[in-house]
Structure formats: C-alpha cells, structure tokens
Image (tube, helix red, strand yellow):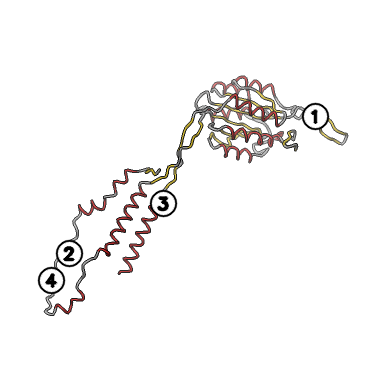
Amino acid sequence: MIHFEWPWLLIALPLPLLIRWLIPANIPVEESALRVPFLDDFSEGKPQAISQDQQWPLLLAATAWFLLVIACARPQWLGEPIEQAISGRDLMLAVDLSASMEEQDFLINKRPVDRLTAIKAVASDFINRRVGDRVGLILFGTQAYLQTPLTFDRKTVQTLLDEAVIGLAGDNTAIGDAIGLAVKRLKNQPANSRVLILLTDGANTAGEVSPLKAAELAAANELKIYTIGVGADEMIVRTFFGSRKVNPSRDLDENTLVKVAESTGGRYFRARNSDELNNIYMLLDKLEPVEKDKQYFRPQTELYAWPLGLALALVTFICLSRVRLL
C-alpha cells in the first residue's frame, strides 16, 4: 500500500488558487491611442482570441505543481509485514587472540587447524542461530578491544570475527580486562538479559584487573559469564629423536575460569576438539534460549523521486517551449 510520511503537506495543493484569489490580476494601464482612418489596413495585426489549445502551458504547470506537492508529502510503498523474533538478551562474545591460539590441535574436515580458526568455524553458526539477540564482540590479548558493539546485525559480527587474526591485540592474555570491558558495555542494559561467553586457552598474564576481581564486578552488575577453556589435552609432536606426547593446554588456568563462571551464575566448559566446542554452543542455546516475543516491521520503499522527476521534466518542457515561442 502507498503511505505518505508527511501527509499534512497536501494542504499546499490549492495554494496557487489562493494566491490568485488574494492578489488581483495586473490591469493594463490605458494609454493614448493612435486613430487611423484606414484601420482595415492593420487588420492582419489584430490580436486573435486565445484558443483552448494555447492553454496547455497552464495545465502542464498545474500538473507539475500537483506532482511537486505529492513528492514533498514523501510517498512510500509499504511491503508485507515481516516477523522478527526479539528476545531482549544482550550477548557478548570475548575471544582470545593471544599467541598461544596458533597451536594447531583442532581438526576440521580431518585437517589440522589452529584454535582461533576452530572457534571461528563453530562460533559463526552459533551467532547465526541467535535470532532476536543483540550480539557484540570483544577481542583480547595483551589488551581488550570492543570490536563490535551490541547489534542485531549478526552478519556484521560474523564478518568481523572472521577477519580477526592472532596477535591483533597483543601476544599475552588479559582475561580480567576483557570481563571488565564487557561489564562496562552491558551495565546500562536491562538486567537478567546480560550474558558473556569468554573463550580462552591460557591464564591471565596481562591487564590491570584480575579475572576474579572482574568477576565480582560482573556479579554485582548481574552479568552471567560462561567460560570456555580451549585446547587439546594431548597431541603427538614429531622431533628429531622421534614422536612424543605433549600437553598443549598446560597453561590453561581452569581453576580461575571455573571460579569466574560460578561466581556469576554461569558455567565452565572444556573444549578439547571441534565436536566438543560445537556441543558447548548447542548447550548454550538451551541454557540461554532465544525467546519467542515477536515484532513486525514493514519494509519501506521511497517513491518521492518519481513525482519529483516528472514535475521537473514538465517545468523544463514549459520553459523550453516559452523560449522557443519568444
């Protein structure tokens, strides 16, 4: 259906008639006349009556005015209502970009990949399923940065996560600063809807705030934190002297991550491979389900350009015809 954004401007349609009624027409002043006894010789120069065919400029001008007023009223085409599920939850992802995330102890399609690549692959599907949630992204290493503020635009969050690279925020791990930044960005949002999912593979080695102190601040601001420890428990390393087993997650501080999660009402998860990481995200979907509140919006297409363009074309045509007649 067609909708006018500013319909009150339609009252300007009779404005030319009002002006014509209020302002009297210009009456030509009578001047001295030259009387000629042989008037018939000037009969060819006698002005002719204006025919109806010569009134077309007035009709075109009236049409141009009508189209101009219609364009000013800003006509829009409203499409069919589109349903949107709105949960009101504010969900922030905090992803570790420290140097240890380069460890290739995950498999995707039977191919070894580093930990950040595995997180990107699984987290993208998780973000895509959060229809109705406002999602934000924090990247942290030596320092914590807000990469994406809370937004319903999940596609942008996925894109910026895919563009993240290891070492972008430094080589160390500032878990406490990442939690503190999440608290700062979420504290003004509605209570009981604030969730932080923090993924890391190490211990807090940088930053100004300790993870436990940041967790106390998060609990005071009703921010629930789910922590995920990333990294395999063992992997085979081939050396000059043969193969041996090593623990690539020896630096993971699980004790602190458990305390951080439990102090805020969340949970700690251990992701040793891609399947476990995916299962954790599926479980998070159940622990923090998307609510079913629905809102509707109607897509709008602006139509003012069409009457405006026609009005300008008519005015141009009238001006050109006047110049040619002169």
- Distance from disc 1 to disc 4, alpha carbons, whole Å, reads 118 Å
> Of circles 1 and 2, which is in front?
2
Q: Position of residue 4 (x, y in %)?
A: 37, 44
If you read the primary sequence from the N terminus, does the residue marked by circle 3 or circle 4 appear first?
A: 4
Q: Secondary structure at mark 1?
A: strand
The kind of residue on which mark 2 rests is Pro
| Residue under numbered circle 1 | 246
Q: Secondary structure at mark 3?
A: helix
The residue closer to the viewer here, 260 or 136, is 136
The residue closer to the viewer here, 255 or 18, is 18
> Of circles 2 and 3, which is in front?
3
Which residue lies at the image location 14% right of the left edge and 77% below the top edge?
39
| Residue under numbered circle 4 | 32
The kind of residue on which mark 3 rests is Ala
| Residue under numbered circle 2 | 28
Q: Position of residue 91 (x, y in %)?
A: 56, 30
> For residue 305, which numbered disc appears in the image?
3
If you read the primary sequence from the N terminus, does the residue marked by circle 2 or circle 3 appear first?
A: 2
If you read the primary sequence from the N terminus, does the residue marked by circle 1 or circle 2 appear first?
A: 2
- Distance from disc 1 to disc 3, alpha carbons, whole Å, reads 68 Å
